[in-house]
Image (spheres, rainbow, N blue to C red):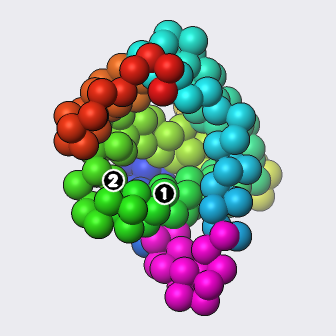
Amino acid sequence: MSIKAMFLIMLLLFVIGILLGFFATLAFQSLGEIGFVKELTKQIYGGAPTKFYSFDTALYIFGRNMLVALISIALGIAVFVPGLIVFANGFVVGLIAFFVTSLMQSPIVSIAAIAPHGIIEIPAILLATGFGTKIGVEFWRYIVRRSKDELLRTLRKAPMIIAIVALMLFAASIVETFVTPYIVSKILGVTITSQG
């Protein structure tokens, strides 16, 4: 399978994760267990800086996302691990989208809080995980069939793929830190300062 095909598979897993995250949170709410989900969210994002319009925050976001991308590529040898990472990320996005939507009684803020940087960040992560999965598939094909040509061709693309992913994630981190808060503040009619 091509890298493009792997990318599309990762996209499907991401969308499924978003839907399950959204509706699972709805189910927890109906069962009165929403506190558990809130605590889970706090554990996931508790160490993240909340200072907007700060280059330090942008670097933190870039570093965190780049680490996920590199781990996804490195663990591609396990084939299914990158897909699990994508699914988990989608689940968290769905979870957060539910909270923001229910809090604001509108999906507009959720979209504004995710879309500006998400249109760059999400494809970058999908590219990394798709590429990692491609490496894994070709590695095991080599183990079974002793045909290494496609594996070598795939590995030769690694520097270019990593560079593209890094550039996209860096751009996304800048947008997330400087542009997304501005758009959200305009929608809410409030001022978001550099102190968060």
Say if the magenta span includes residue 75. no
Total marks drawn? 2
Residue at horizontal 32 percent and vertical 59 percent from the top: 104
Residue sitting nearer the eye, 56 or 14: 56
Q: Main secondary structure of the magenta part?
A: helix
The residue that mark 2 highlights is 110
> In the figure, residue 167 lies in which quadrant?
top left
Q: CA distance from mark 1 to mark 2?
A: 8 Å
Residue sitting nearer the eye, 126 or 50: 50
* Residue 21 to residue 93: above or below: below
* Residue 97 in view here: no
The disc at residue 3 is none
- The image position of residue 178, as x and y in percent, is 36, 20
| Residue at disc 1, secondary structure | helix
Q: Which residues are magenta?
A: 21-35
If you read the primary sequence from the N terminus, does the residue marked by circle 1 or circle 2 appear first? Answer: 1
| Residue at disc 2, secondary structure | helix
Say if the magenta span includes residue 31. yes
The residue lying furthest to the right in this view is 143
Q: Are marks 1 and 2 in contact (CB under 8 Å)?
A: yes
Q: Amino acid at mark 2?
A: Ser
- Crowding near the residue tagged with mark 2, few <14, some 14–19, many ≥20 C-alpha atoms within 10 Å: many
The disc at residue 96 is 1
- The image position of residue 119, as x and y in percent, is 31, 39
The residue lying furthest to the top in this view is 55
* Residue 137 falls left or right of residue 195: right
- The image position of residue 109, as x and y in percent, is 28, 51
